[in-house]
Image (spheres, rainbow, N blue to C red):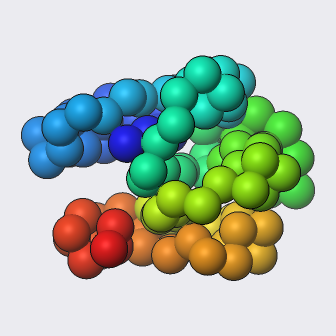
Amino acid sequence: MLVLDDSEDRISWFRQRLRSVQFAKTSAGAINLLSQHRFKVAFLDHDLHWMDAGFPNRQHGNGKEVARYLASQGFDGIVVIHSRSDQAEVMAKILPQAKVCPFGDFDIAQCSE
């Protein structure tokens, strides 16, 4: 499993609940991991930098960039967009197979099935 998130609190939350998980705090880090490993599940956040909240139309350095990468690679695993940002819906349009489950409002087992 891959978790893309920049929040230490959320990373800790995922770490307590998942085994065999790799974490990325940046879009570049996530894309690097995705290019080197085959993941079955990817949890994606959108806002990875303060600019993402202030400038939601940014296309790079956030979850949209990783969503586009997954789409371009034909990722056939489970994608859970756990972002609480309005941009989660934009990411879901890029990855129509993804489930949008805002962090704090979901159970991992329900969203990753």
Query: Viewer-proximal residue, 42 or 87?
Result: 42
Q: Is residue 18 visible?
A: yes
What residue is shown at x 57% (from left), y 72% (from top)? 98
Using residue 69 as the reference point, say whether residue 59 is left or right of it: right
Q: Position of residue 33 (x, y in %)?
A: 57, 25
Q: Is residue 52 visible?
A: no
Query: Viewer-proximal residue, 107 or 47?
Result: 107
Query: Viewer-proximal residue, 36 or 111?
Result: 36
Query: Viewer-proximal residue, 10 or 112?
Result: 112
Which quadrant is home to the N terminus?
A: top left
Using residue 63 as the reference point, say whether residue 45 is left or right of it: left
Q: Position of residue 69 (x, y in %)?
A: 78, 45
What residue is shown at x 60% (from left), y 22% (from top)? 36
**How many badges with numbers are in the image?**
0
Question: Does 103 appear above or below 19?
Answer: below
Using residue 22 as the reference point, say whether residue 70 is left or right of it: right
Which quadrant is home to the C terminus?
A: bottom left
Q: Among all residues in the image, which is located at the extreme left?
A: 16
What residue is shown at x 19% (from left), y 44% (from top)? 18
Q: Position of residue 84 (x, y in %)?
A: 50, 65
What residue is shown at x 78% (from left), y 67% (from top)? 94
Question: Does 57 appear above or below 96?
Answer: above
Question: Does 73 appear above or below 15?
Answer: below
Q: Position of residue 45 (x, y in %)?
A: 53, 51
Tell me which corner region of the image, top left, top right, bottom left or bottom right, holds residue 111.
bottom left
